[in-house]
């Protein structure tokens, strides 16, 4: 017996909640788990939208069979070939060997690379349509959201957008899967974290995808992660639009590493002066405690970034250096940057962070602060000056 997860008379949620996985992509924490969403349209022709991660639910194929009844599965439509959505394709083909697999040319290159040459491939191009009977599906190519083969499907009959990883978020869907049946408050922060961690590098492709979707009469968004969105569509699209434009709120993220507390004292002095200057959104992260997943999410939220590091083996403190690499990968734009560092006998961290500043192309604010050994009156003054420069720059945007 399987739960009735019906969205409309002909559309069913056939997804899986994963509450066991600790790290998404073996990188990003999942304190609230994650859902792998799959959807089944039961029409004159039946179509399955994506599958789930292999082994995430032993009853997955039985559930699909219970929804189909004695009907055949006519189509499998692949929006994204990442293995958390394609992992059950091989098992699905064993049970439904005659199913037609719908995708684009790049989809099939990846698919056949994993599973070998397959029969019954139906290649579609951008704007092509597929009639299931009552439902008419239109395929919309959205490359690099967030793999090269990604696409979306718009059900022109009911206004339902099957968006792949687009508009996704972390978190299982507990009890219900429709936004009208659950408290969605927990998903907004997890949507920012998901975007910044997974999609963050691809702001320009996301903007192009949003332009393609503009004007469509969307009534429902069925993403491959998170709730099915019906009454929060404008907010969901708005979050992705803003993040992909690298727009951010007034505020400062202070990120630092500190072995014995001296560099941390500099961070505290900067934060205190920012507050004194009227900046209210101040987030501090010790890189040895805060996971990069949460730090990146905050950097996507706020315009100001101030980074601090002690010198470690003539380099940047390793966890700070790792974070800076992750920031560069995401090609963030429109951020204001300050930095500070410390050393005992030979300084290198500030010099190395100058190299990051040049690569990032962030707007440099204030003078970098370098401290030898312990805090002195001059160090406090320099930290306060850096904070004032950042506050002044942020206030110009008010």
Image (cartoon, rainbow, N blue to C red):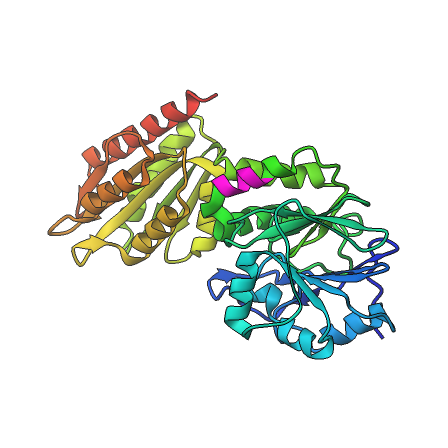
Is 346 magenta? The answer is no
Using the image, determine if residue 9 lies above or below residue 242: below
Using the image, determine if residue 275 lies above or below residue 258: above
- Residue 355, position in %: x, y? 23, 43
Name the residue located 74 percent from the left edge and 49 percent from the top edge.
137
- Residue 369, position in %: x, y? 22, 37
The residues colored magenta run: 204-209
Q: Residue furthest left?
A: 345
Q: Is residue 349 left or right of residue 73?
A: left
Who is closer to the viewer here, 136 or 123? 123
Q: Is residue 331 left or right of residue 40?
A: left
- Residue 307, position in %: x, y? 32, 43
Q: Give the prevailing secondary structure in the magenta stretch.
A: helix
Q: Is residue 194 left or right of residue 185?
A: left
Q: Is residue 125 left or right of residue 278?
A: right
Name the residue located 28 percent from the left edge and 41 percent from the top edge.
359
In the rendered image, is residue 397 in sight?
yes
- Residue 27, position in %: x, y? 46, 62
Is 205 magenta? The answer is yes
Number of numbered markers: 0
The quadrant where residue 86 appears: bottom right
Name the residue located 61 percent from the left edge and 73 percent from the top edge.
54
Using the image, determine if residue 290 lies above or below residue 387: below
**Quarter of the picture holding the N terminus:** bottom right
């Amino acid at each position: 017996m399987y739960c009735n997860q019906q969205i409309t008379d002909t559309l069913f949620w056939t997804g899986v909640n994963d509450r066991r996985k600790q790290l998404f992509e073996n990188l990003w924490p999942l304190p609230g788990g994650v859902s792998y969403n799959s959807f089944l349209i039961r029409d004159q022709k039946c179509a399955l939208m994506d599958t789930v991660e292999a082994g995430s639910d032993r009853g997955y194929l039985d559930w699909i069979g219970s929804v189909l009844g004695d009907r055949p599965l006519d189509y499998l439509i692949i929006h994204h070939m990442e293995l958390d959505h394609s992992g059950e394709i091989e098992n699905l083909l064993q049970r439904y060997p005659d199913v037609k697999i719908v995708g684009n040319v790049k989809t099939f290159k990846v698919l056949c690379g994993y599973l070998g040459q397959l029969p019954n491939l139906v290649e579609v191009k951008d704007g092509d349509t597929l009639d299931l009977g009552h439902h008419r599906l239109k395929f919309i190519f959205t490359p690099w959201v967030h793999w090269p083969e990604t696409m979306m499907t718009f059900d022109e009959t009911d206004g339902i957008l099957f968006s792949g990883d687009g508009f996704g978020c972390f978190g299982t869907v507990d009890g219900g899967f429709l936004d009208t049946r659950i408290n969605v408050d927990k998903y907004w922060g997890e949507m920012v974290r998901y975007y910044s961690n997974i999609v963050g590098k691809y702001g320009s492709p996301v903007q192009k995808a949003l332009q393609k979707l503009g004007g469509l009469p969307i009534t429902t968004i069925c993403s491959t992660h998170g709730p099915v969105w019906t009454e929060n569509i404008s907010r969901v699209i708005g979050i992705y639009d803003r993040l992909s434009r690298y727009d951010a709120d007034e505020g400062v993220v202070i990120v630092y590493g500190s072995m014995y507390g001296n560099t941390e004292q500099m961070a505290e002095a900067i934060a205190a002066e920012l507050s004194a200057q009227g900046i209210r959104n101040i987030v501090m992260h010790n890189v040895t405690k805060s996971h990069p997943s949460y730090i990146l999410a905050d950097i996507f939220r706020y315009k100001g970034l101030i980074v601090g590091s002690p010198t470690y083996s003539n380099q940047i403190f390793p966890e700070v250096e790792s974070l800076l690499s992750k920031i560069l990968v995401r090609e963030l734009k429109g951020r204001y940057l300050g930095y500070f560092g410390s050393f005992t006998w030979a300084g290198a961290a500030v010099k190395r962070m100058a190299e990051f500043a040049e690569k990032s192309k962030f707007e440099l604010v204030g003078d970098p602060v370098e401290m030898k050994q312990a805090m002195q009156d001059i160090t406090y003054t320099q930290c306060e000056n850096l904070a004032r420069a950042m506050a002044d720059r942020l206030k110009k945007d008010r």
